[in-house]
Image (tube, coloured by chain):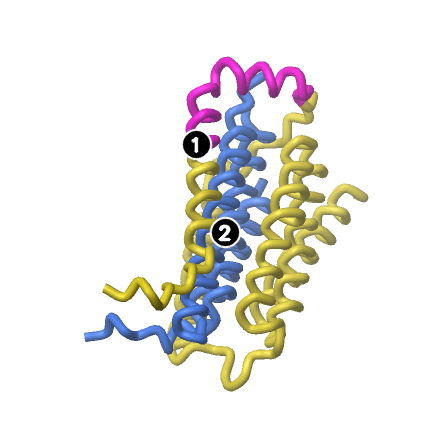
Chain colours: A blue, B yellow
Amino acid sequence: MTFYLALSVLLFCVGLAGVLARRHAIMALIGIELMLNAANINFIAFWRHSSAADDLSGMFWMIFSVAIAAAEAAVGLALVILVFRHRRSVRLDELESLKG
Amino acid sequence: MPTDVILWILGGLILISAVMSLALRNLIHCALFLMVCFLGLAGLYLHLNAVFSGLVQALVYVGAVGIILIFAILLTEGGGTETGSHLGSQWRTGIGLAVLLAFALLGAVSNSPQTTQAARHTEEPTVREIGLKLMTDYLLPLQTIGLLLTAAAIGAVVLAMQEPKPRKDETP
């Protein structure tokens, strides 16, 4: 159990570092996908280690989380393509029109 | 014990490919390493005796999310290597924060009383059981997620759609 929790923590922090450090918008989306997957490890690990006999809630949490992540990826990538079409750039630090 | 060896190999594969998918300069290589990481996670779920979840992970992440990531990369940067620095201006702060959070969370995990529980090794639920549960207990979440996915798909199409060029004879 400790193994799965530690793996989840490390994967989450790798994803967080990627979101915070990379300049490219698609890399930020990849980091977010890694963080969501780290949460899914916890759902499955706690489900397989829980004492409830025939409760499937951990698996359903994971499946709904996967569905939401897929929706998020589709909308996020469509936004990236839209921003690229308008600005010819998807560098996160060059998108500063809203800066005061 | 062989099962421990499999776990360590899978964990190492997941972590190394995750780091590679965020550290490389070529975006296509990043997406391919991300798909390797997702495959490792699917193997981890299979090893945890959660077969359905593992197959969902392989289908949705490796199949769908990986492919649309590669499409988006090709539609924006043309798949080339990034020019200039690939790190943001505050990358030291970001990585420092992530390392700090990792230490805090690892400390919390190692002190947790939950971690002493052993695995149950019960039967994997059959697809029939999963379907029955989805159609009875989880009907409302299922319908809601269907609505959300439809809305997201339509929204993504509307966002990425080319606007038609304004016709010249329609100037107001």
Q: Which of B44 and B24 lies nearest the eye of the viewer?
A: B24
Q: Is residue B63 above or below residue B86?
A: above
Amino acid type shown at disc 1: Leu
Q: Quadrant of the C terminus of chain B?
A: bottom left
Q: Does the magenta-highlighted stretch encompass residue B74?
A: no
Amino acid type shown at disc 2: Ala
Q: Is residue A12 above or below residue B137?
A: below
Q: Position of residue A1 (x, y in %)?
A: 58, 40
Left-right relation of B156 to A6 = left
Q: Which of B71 and A23 lies nearest the eye of the viewer?
A: B71
Q: Which residue is mark 1?
A: B147
Range covered by the magenta-colored residues: B125-146
Chain identifier of the residue bearing label 2 in the image: A
Circles 2 and 1 in contact, beta carbons < 8 Å = no
Name the residue located 37 percent from the left edge and 77 percent from the top edge.
A94
- Label 1: few (<14), some or many (≥20) within 10 Å? few
Q: Which of B164 and A43 lies nearest the eye of the viewer?
A: B164
Name the residue located 35 percent from the left edge and 68 percent from the top edge.
B168
